[in-house]
Amino acid sequence: MFYDVIVIGAGLAGLMAAEAAQSQGARVLVLARGMGSLPLTTGCIDGLGYFPRTTNIPLSSPLSALPQLKEDHPYHPYAIVGQEKIMLAMAHFQELGQVIGLPYYGTFASTLLIPTPLGTYHPTCLVPETMNQGNLSIPGPVLLLGFRGLKDFFPFLAAENLNILHSQGKIASSFRAEVLEKLDLGGKAMNGLNLARAFDGEDFRNAFIKIVRPLLKSGDSIALSTGYLAGKLAAGFAGKNKFTTENTEITEMGLKPKD
Amino acid sequence: MKSDIDQCIKCSICNAYCPVLKATGLFPGPKLAGPDAERFRLEGKNIPAEWLEFCDYCKICEQVCPHNVPIPELHVRSRLTLGKTQKPSFRDWLLGHAYLLEKLGSWGAPLSNWINGWAFFRWLLDRGLGIDRRAKMPSFHHQTFAQWFHSRKLVKGKPLAYFYGCYTNYIEPSLGRSVVEILEKNGFQVFLPQQECCGLPLISNGFFTLAARMGEKNLKALQKTVEDGVEIVFSSPSCGMTLSQEYKDILHLPGASAVAENLYEISQFLLQLHEDGQLKTDFREIKETYYYHVPCHLRALQVGLPALELLSLIPGLKVMELPEGCCGLAGTYGLKREKYAVAREVGEEIFQVIRQWNVQKVISDCEACRLQIGSQTGVQTFHPAQILRQAYGE
């Protein structure tokens, strides 16, 4: 069999390279062992979190740091391809997201801070639109929800750590935590994958809203422990989980009572 | 054994792609039922039987694993252990011997088809044996493919062996005819080596010793073929997978590797012929749109999607790929009463798309996929070779 381009690896970089080549008319073969790392990644597209390397304060705009980066590290990939191509690539990625029904929010010109399961922040540039509900620069109280039996997320630990960052003025949101008692996942084990799939079902969402509504105080946002926090979900399921009911809007990262 | 369980890094990619886990809570997923359970098994602890029985053996987990964990092989090892304490049911014995049923059905056709379509008979099978009465049974042909083949005049050419499989022989002889006629058109002299059922239904129902016996018989004939310098093609990805992988990895049959090296999936073989500039391409125009479903066991063969490329040579023909996924039937799995609903749920995403897109004609290399998709959606189904044969005209 004959190909113009052979891409090795089926992670985000490999798939994007293959797509770019194919969209320009090349016959492309992707070689990979297994399915590639997409189900394991956060679903975020990071720009440049910290610069210079010695700082521990997130960069507010990767774009504005490019000239200095180019001077300090002339062989950095960003320095080699240049600003114009970075912006083009980001825009192309966002177009693809629109096409497949997984729209992305953000830009290379500004950093978003997204919470991690352990309660710190993750500087990034593009996030699935539904994940932007968890943007830590949105002020106001947030209720972090855990699920009894979910082994990968400890909402009280996360809330405590995030509140330390809040008190230091590093993030705008403040947090408290609750753990929901056992929810019925149709007999399936409680884990991020099964939970995210359960949220695709309308009955489960309605049952969930019923349980959660009494826990909300006025002005609360809600962050679920599913979704982004178990990174695999963000890539595959984020788009599907956004839904609106009469007076409640739930997205993968957040649930807000509408006024 | 290819590798040990420590290679599993618990990434859960297998769970993310397992069609059975998605469909039912009765199956804990390949990670737990595979490498995790293996740790307990190695310590002599029992694994719940339903963890093993609800696997539909599509082998997607093995395909998607980035660390070469032989999950289906672990599964089989567990079933072997289970088999020592728990005998498979008569129903499973019967389904494992699908070739006998097909032989009988073909011999008794058309009477057998009439009985098969009889609601009371299906009710008896359902209640008495646990074979779901809603599952569509294929209809048998009285003249088998092999009988048709031997009734005709020999065509001279370059020798090539064809492993046709039971389904082609008893249920879909027209597929075998298409394969033979395509090959003869391209200058080959087809012959049929002595063959038995490949043994996959026996493997998937837990009868490994019986499957090995089948395998030994098949290998004996196929080894002879290979020694004569003749290559072998097959038209059923599941039979092909059994011959080329299960004989070696699961049944550990001597001589399996040498045969595997000379086995080709029919579209793979024809595409290779085309790339060597030797395939006749005087196809007539077919102005139609077909949809293509990729069988799990074709993926397991790791030969790409040769049928799609081959069919793209036919002028006017449009072939669109259906969304990836398992159709759910998995040989005899979807016929079992306790699994019928799971099997339907597994394939539901594909069926929904077929209904939404108003699909009329589906192409798939695997007979089980064709049976399941056809019976669940009512579409017409074809093997790629049947379309290719049509394009060659009279």
Image (tube, coloured by chain):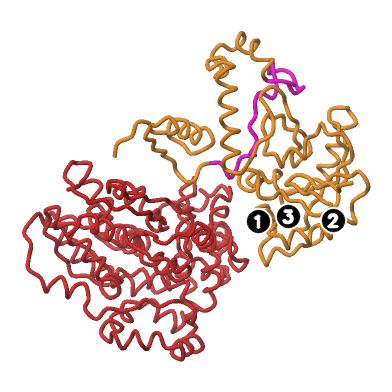
Chain colours: A orange, B red
Q: Determine which quarter of the picture holds residue B29.
A: bottom right
Is there CB contact under 8 Å for labels 3 and 1?
no
- Chain letter for mark 2: A
Residue kind at label 1, given as amino acid type: Arg
Q: Position of residue B379 (x, y in %)?
A: 42, 66
Q: In which quarter of the image is the C terminus of chain B?
A: bottom left
Q: Which mark is residue A197?
A: 1
Q: What element carries label 3?
A: loop
User: Does the magenta portion include B50?
Assistant: no
Decide if residue B377 is on the left or right side of residue A250.
Answer: left
Residue kind at label 2, given as amino acid type: Val
Looking at the image, which residue is at 64% across and 10% down?
Answer: A67
Q: Mark 2 or mark 3: name the one nearer the start of the chain.
A: 3
Q: Distance between the residues labelled 3 and 1?
A: 14 Å
Alpha-carbon neighbours of circle 3 within 10 Å: few (<14), some, or many (≥20)?
Answer: some
Taking depth in this image into account, of B360 and A72 the one nearest to the observer is: B360
* Image position of A68 with respect to A30: above or below: above
Q: Position of residue B26 (x, y in %)?
A: 60, 69
Q: Where is residue A164 in the image (x, y as percent from the top left)?
A: 87, 34
Q: Mark 2 points at which residue?
A: A212
* Image position of A210 with respect to A40: above or below: below
Residue kind at label 3, given as amino acid type: Leu
Q: How far apart are marks 2 and 1 (CA)?
A: 18 Å
Looking at the image, which residue is at 65% across and 47% down?
Answer: A233
Looking at the image, which residue is at 30% across and 68% down?
Answer: B198
Q: How far apart are marks 2 and 3 (CA)?
A: 17 Å
Q: Is mark 1 on a helix, strand or loop?
A: helix
Q: Are marks 3 and 1 on the same chain?
A: yes
Q: Name the residue under label 3.
A: A150
